[in-house]
Amino acid sequence: MPFFGEESRTLGAYLKKHSARTGLWSGFDKYFISLMKAYYGDSATQGNEWGFHWLPRVTGDHSHFGYWLDMADGKLDGLFVMGQNPAVGASNGRLERKALAKLKWLVVRDMVETETASFWYASPEVERGELSPDSIATEVFLFPAAGTAEKAGTFTNTQRLLQHREKAVDPPGEARSETWFMVHLGRRVKGMAQQNHDSQNDPLRALTWDYSTDGSEAEPRVEEVLREINGSSLVDHKQLGHINDLKNDGSTKCGAWIYCGVFPDESRNRANEREPKDLLGHGWGFAWPNDCRIIYNRASARPDGSPWSERKKLVWWDESKQEWTGLDNPDCDKKIPPQAPTEIYNGHGVEALGGAKPFTLHPDGVGWLYVASGLKDGPLPAHYEPLESLIENPLYNQQTNPVADRKKRTDNPYAALHDARFPFVLTTYRLTEHHTAGGMSRHLAHLSELQPELFTEVSPELAAKQGLRHGEWATIITARALIEARVLVTTRMRPLCINGQDVHQVGVPYHWGYKGCVTGDVVNDLLVISEEPNVRIMETKALTCNITPGRRGRGRQALNQLASEIGKRA
Amino acid sequence: MSVTAFLTDSTLCIGCKACEVACKEWNGIDDDGLHWSGFSYDNTGSVGASTWRHVKFVEQPPVPGLGGNAGEQMSWTFSSDVCKHCEEAGCLEACPTGSIVRTEFGGVFIQPDVCNGCGYCVTSCPFGVVERHSKDGRAFKCTFCYDRQKAGLVPACARVCPTESIKFGEIEELRTHASKRLEELRQRGIHDATVYDPRDTTVGGTHAIFIVRGDPRSYNLPPHPEVPTAYLKKAWTSSVVAAGLLLGGTLLAFLLDGKRNARKLRR
């Protein structure tokens, strides 16, 4: 569901803002009220706007970086970190780790003691004397977590496919699943709210939290959760089979409208079906929405309903049956014929799109190259230079994205254009041998031996220019931090020639940290915190840096070295 | 019992090293040590006592006119190496204890409980596959997942390969598949692809066939592998000749000496 802004003080205003008259978003009220019924059950009534006022409001930038900067400024008391290792994985790692020291409490749930859990005694800030275990007031709780094979549940991949997996083995010791942790934490918090009748606890008291548990460890039954997400009718208590079954009168509940149909009756978990019947994989798992394997597949047929290509056909109009049929479930109303006219200006719902507009989430039913609404930096794709760049934008006068959120502050500084201190381009990436911030790979010898040490890749030209020697060490410096890495000279890295200017690139994979069987400097310390305005993704692929031969200083010296490099004339 | 083989198609390999890890996990092999080599993305170096599958990273200068990479860019190809399981296996022939045997699947298997660590097999392998474990002393190499094959399972490396670069199956079927694949690659303009299947050499064919681009030597595959016992006849012949010559020489020496003594006596 969309975020709540200041403009959404009432349910009516909120629904109006996010509904559309035509297309699938015309059903927004059905999706939202069904969600409120799933959250609050009988407590959600038409009289209290289905509990709309109980929902927490968005008061600022609550993306990762938004709340991390709040944390750095001491505005956050506590934090839960599950399956994430921001001390290694997030931009401007120094700022991130120092911010953790401002918390009152920190809960980390992971399979190993990650850098995030050990920042208070093992981070470079402690080694350099910026933080000290004696003066950090953060109380750190490290909970052992069950691994993927040690718990049941579903994965949803980027292809929208839900796949259920069974538990293979019991987790060791006191390790438990996230579901276990959240259900039992919820029970306790709700129990406390029931003791205390303060009105701020109303949402907790209204919340439905009746998950049953199983076995000696009281593990929640995950299928029960998926059943709730799928949704059911509150009249006959039967599971819902299709998004079209959702109602806006409080007679249905549904945890996520797009997942509706994954659990169409009490005993049928479609995410757990494992007999693929065709090339598109129907019968293996469940793809949201409505098990459509290719989204907007109506576009595979001509406006008249016949396939554009016999070889690539997906769905088509069956004249004899008077319905859409084909190799995939049609991602459109099955019964609307291709000839049905478009009535975008006065019609309602998906019907108003007519029979030849495949993009049903858009109010006009067509795909958009020119995006008139919704994006903060539309309406057309444009080229901007990275926020830190060595060259002027060759296409426009506008150098960088004008609406990018730069989060500029003294502990998050940028290099300027043509900044002489940072004459090379830095790019970061991953290796197949390690998994993101390393919590699941740097603690395993069979993966660590494959990529045991942090290295930086440079071209022979850059190596010659900077005096870097293959196999030896280099220090990489940006406006935020400095790190050291082994030098790998390879012709795979090539200088670029842009507008007649040689641009050298420094490549660094980012997986290392200070815990595990292989360790190394945290590459993300080099990055700046920035946010693309629509989805709030940081820039990690193009920044500016300097690279010099030799290792960085140890302890305090590292800070002095950084200060002297940054202190040079820009 | 069908005679099986690996077909490793390096044109499909993405260098993920899943085969290496699956092999070590299934067979319970040690890591090679946590040492950075600086040799492309390869840090385990070669097939050896504690690495039975090994992914090679081959960086080569551009070859203009050949498909695949853009003409002006260097190529970066990967290939998963393994014991070749030769028909005429140097290691097996050199083993004095009978530890190394041929299995019913056609593979070559070292029985660790029989091996005494003499190391004759190490010097007799034409591919440099067999190695003595530095701590244990015995020789180790790919078992062709004999235990898995016995149970009707595919070897661990082939099972996990995400691109089907490592194929496992009946050897003649794989040979047919390899020639079809080569034809397909050539039709796509990849004229430098070849099948590495050294049947016309003294190893008499292998149970690990490869499809590679360019010179097989770039992938550590010798063009004419030789089993040391191929020189057995020559060696025996020269030994016999040498022995004959020595014997003849000795006899001659006695004979000449005897004549000289006879002359002395006559005088």
Image (cartoon, grey):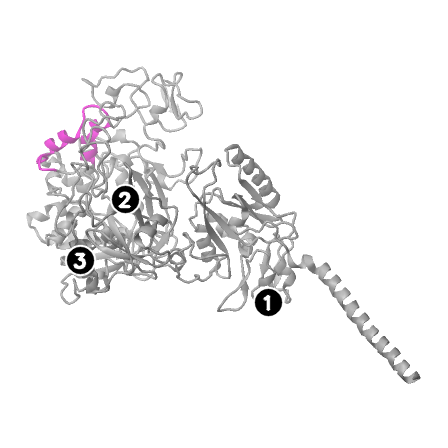
- Residue at horizontal 80%, vertical 74%? B250
Cα separation between marks 3 and 2: 26 Å
Say which residue label 1 marks. B114
Pointer 3 chain: A
Identity, as a three-letter code, of the amino acid under mark 2:
Lys
Which residue was labeled with disc 2?
A541
Give the image location of residue A6, x and y in percent: 8, 37
- The nearer-to-camera label among 3 and 2 is 3
Mark 3, residue position: A564
Category of crowding for the residue at label 2, using alpha-carbon neighbours closer than 10 angstroms: few (below 14), some (14–19), many (at least 20): few
**CB atoms of marks 2 and 1 within 8 Å:** no
Q: In this picture, which residue range is highlighted in magenta?
A: A5-34
Tally of marks: 3
Residues B212 and A360: in front is B212
Circle 1 Cα neighbour tier, 10 Å, few/some/many (<14 / 14–19 / ≥20): few
Which residue is more in the foreground, B237 or B112? B237
Circle 2 SS class: loop
Q: Where is residue B162 in the image (x, y as percent from the top left)?
A: 44, 45
Q: Residue at 84% across / 78% down in the picture?
A: B257
Task: Look at label 1 and name its amino acid.
Answer: Val
Q: Is A474 situated left or right of B143 in this image?
A: left
Q: Say left or right for B216 vs A122.
A: right
Task: Identify the element where label 3 is drawn.
Answer: helix
Quadrant position of residue B258: bottom right
Q: Residue at x 15, y 67 (%)?
A: A134
The secondary element bearing badge 1 is classed as loop
The reply to whether residue A277 is in sight is yes
Question: Which numbered circle lies on residue A249?
Answer: none
The reply to whether the C-beta atoms of the residues labelled 3 and 2 are less than 8 Å apart is no
Please tell me whether residue B110 is drawn above or below residue B221 in the rendered image: below
- The residue under label 3 is which amino acid type? Ser
Q: Which chain carries label 2?
A: A
